[in-house]
Image (tube, rainbow, N blue to C red):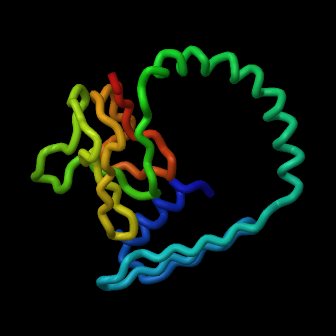
Amino acid sequence: MDLKEIQNLIKFVAKSGTSEVKLETDDFKITIKTGAGESVTTVVQQTAVPMQQPVIAPPAQEVAPVQAAAPPAVVTEDAKYITVKSPIIGTFYRRPSPDKPLFAEVGQTISEGDVLCVIEAMKLFNEIESEISGKIVKILVDDASPVEFDQPLFLVDPS
């Protein structure tokens, strides 16, 4: 079960009004508890399967040369841009609230310390500030989408 499936399960449980759900398979156990005024709690315990590593490793070595040929074209195109990445896992928002203007838009010039977005994690809204100055070339995530740690959010042209 991947992160998106877990997030969808949490949303489903929260909307259904159920107070507790337990899901257990051979690989993991998940318990989701909800309550009035409480936040959703998720506990995930995964067990390692030692047989998967030898099976996975050889195909990655065989496939790597084929994949290595394709990315350089993409890298050279975006090489002049700096990628702003998510420092945390959470939900990406482009504006502070639905009735407020966007923090940043494509084509906007930003400077170091400007707020680019907020990421909600555990009911806390964390402002993500720019560490560089430049012009926003591309926004890589849709508003109100889940993001993972180190996921690219923005492409910035520093020139």
Of 92 and 21, nearer the camera is 92
The picture places residue 111, in percent across and down from the top left corner, at 25, 38
Residue at x 82%, y 60% (from the top left corner): 49
Q: Residue at x 48, y 44 (%)?
A: 151
Q: How many marks?
A: 0
Which quarter of the figure is the N terminus placed in? bottom right
Q: Residue at x 83, y 34 (%)?
A: 59
Q: Position of residue 11 (x, y in %)?
A: 40, 64
Foreground of the two, 138 or 44: 138
Name the residue located 41 percent from the left edge and 52 percent from the top edge. Answer: 146
Up the image or down, 102 lies above or below 99; here it is above
Percent position (x, y) of residue 100?
A: 11, 51
Quadrant of the image occupied by residue 156: top left
Among the 4 quarters of the image, the one containing residue 22: bottom right
Residue 140 on image: x %, y %: 39, 35
In this orientation, which residue lies closer to the viewer: 100 or 156? 156
Residue 139 or residue 98, whichever sits in front: 139
Q: Is residue 21 above or below residue 1?
A: below
> Does 10 appear above or below 109?
below
**Left or right of residue 126: residue 146:** right
- Residue 128 position (above or below residue 112): below
The quadrant in which the C terminus is found is top left
